[in-house]
Amino acid sequence: MDEEKLEQAPPPPPPPNAWPYPIMVAGITFRVKDMAEITTDDVVAEREPDNQFDKYAVRISLLTAEGKLHHIGYVPKDIACRIYDKELPVKGKIVWRCVEPGQVGLRIQI
């Protein structure tokens, strides 16, 4: 009698990103004055349904080592309205930092 070989199913694919490209954080200059304030690469994107200016606002916060969130900006409107219905909140990473002295800017991947 031949032994049947049981094949294991491949693992499920990782969940898709909320957005496939790096995103420039909007409004960061109002909340971060010096890039030295950014001490982690971990971020969280979450809906902000009570935002008085944009009903599709997606807030970006730093996730500190202590597990606290520090609001630093928003996903730009043209992207936020397209990811608002995705599974949020979602964790992400900083993928680019402005290195020009006196300038503030981040790109994230979520």
Image: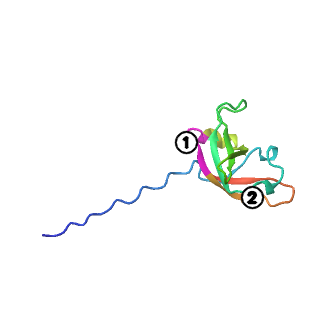
Q: Residue furthest left?
A: 1
Tell me, yes or no, if residue 11 can be seen here. Answer: yes
Residue drawn at (72%, 46%) of the image: 70
- Picture mark count: 2
Tell me, yes or no, if residue 110 can be seen here. Answer: no
Q: Quadrant location of residue 97?
A: bottom right
Residue 87 painted magenta: yes
Residue type, mark 1 in image: Lys
Percent coordinates x, y for residue 45 in the rendering: 63, 45
Q: Quadrant location of residue 30?
A: top right
Question: What segment carries the magenta color?
Answer: 82-91
Residue drawn at (70%, 43%) of the image: 76
Q: Residue 101 or 79: which is nearer the viewer? A: 101
Percent coordinates x, y for residue 61 in the rendering: 69, 46
Residues at marks 2 and 1 touching, judged by CB atoms closer than 8 Å: no
Residue where numbered disc 1 is placed: 86
- Left or right of 41? Residue 4 is left
Residue where numbered disc 2 is placed: 97
- Check the image and report above or below for 11 versus 89: below
